[in-house]
């Protein structure tokens, strides 16, 4: 018996922000603002990748890996993002950013969605501008994850 490859569900529609380009422009402006907050681009890419993994957004996981590699991330670190707590290749600041990304993505997992301990650890490593940058990147990633997952945007499609 020959195994058949699973088929992926068809895309429901184009990304709504592409269908309505007047929506894409301000979203891209938020993305640019997040990049201007003083957080290393590689850290923003790690945060984007981790939130996308949690949300199961194959489009953003695929594109996020490509963007992270362009920002200088190694395959070793990219492979370890899903298990960052056990991996030794992340700095304290990166760990704090990844913890913040997880908490802000999994809002319904606990009574206090972003516990003070998570926030305080991030605030130990990042100033207010950088925290704003991280928070905007996490929020925007979650928005795009939801648009892409809802409309079944396929992995491997270009950004």
Image (cartoon, grey):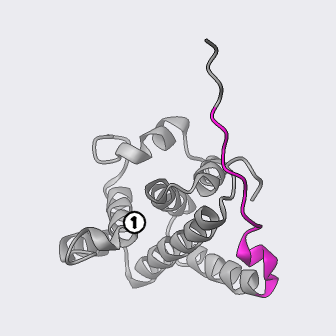
Up/down of 107 relative to 9, above or below: below
User: Is any atom of residue 27 visible in this view?
Assistant: yes
Determine the residue positioned at 52% across, 63% down.
Answer: 44
Crowdedness near tag 1: few (<14), some (14–19) or many (≥20) residues, C-alpha within 10 Å: many
> In front: 146, or 120?
146
Dominant secondary structure of the residues highlighted in magenta in the image: loop
Q: Residue at x 37, y 48 (%)?
A: 90
Q: Is 145 inside the magenta-drawn segment?
A: no
Q: Which residues are magenta?
A: 6-22
Return the x and y of residue 95 as percentages of the image width and height: 33, 56
Q: In the shown orientation, is residue 158 left or right of residue 152? A: right
Please identify the quarter of the rendering in which residue 64 is found: bottom right
Residue pointed to by mark 1? 101
- In the image, 35: left or right of 157? left
Q: Is residue 87 above or below residue 41?
A: above
Task: Kindly indicate the quadrant of the structure image that contains residue 131.
Answer: bottom left
Residue at left 48%, top 71%? Answer: 138
């Amino acid at each position: 018996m020959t195994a058949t490859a699973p088929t992926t569900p068809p895309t429901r529609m184009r990304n709504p922000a592409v269908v309505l380009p007047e929506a894409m422009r301000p979203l891209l402006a938020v993305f640019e603002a997040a990049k201007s907050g003083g957080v290393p681009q590689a850290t923003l890419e790690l945060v984007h990748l981790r939130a996308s993994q949690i949300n199961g957004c194959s489009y953003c996981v695929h594109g996020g890996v490509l963007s992270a590699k362009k920002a200088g991330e190694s395959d070793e670190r990219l492979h370890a993002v899903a298990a960052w707590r056990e991996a030794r290749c992340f700095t304290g600041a990166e760990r704090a950013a990844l913890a913040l990304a997880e908490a802000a993505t999994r809002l319904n997992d606990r009574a206090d969605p972003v516990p003070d301990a998570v926030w305080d650890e991030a605030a130990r490593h990042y100033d207010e501008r950088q925290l704003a940058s991280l928070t905007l990147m996490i929020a925007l990633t979650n928005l795009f994850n939801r648009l892409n997952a809802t409309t079944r945007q396929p992995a491997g499609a270009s950004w």
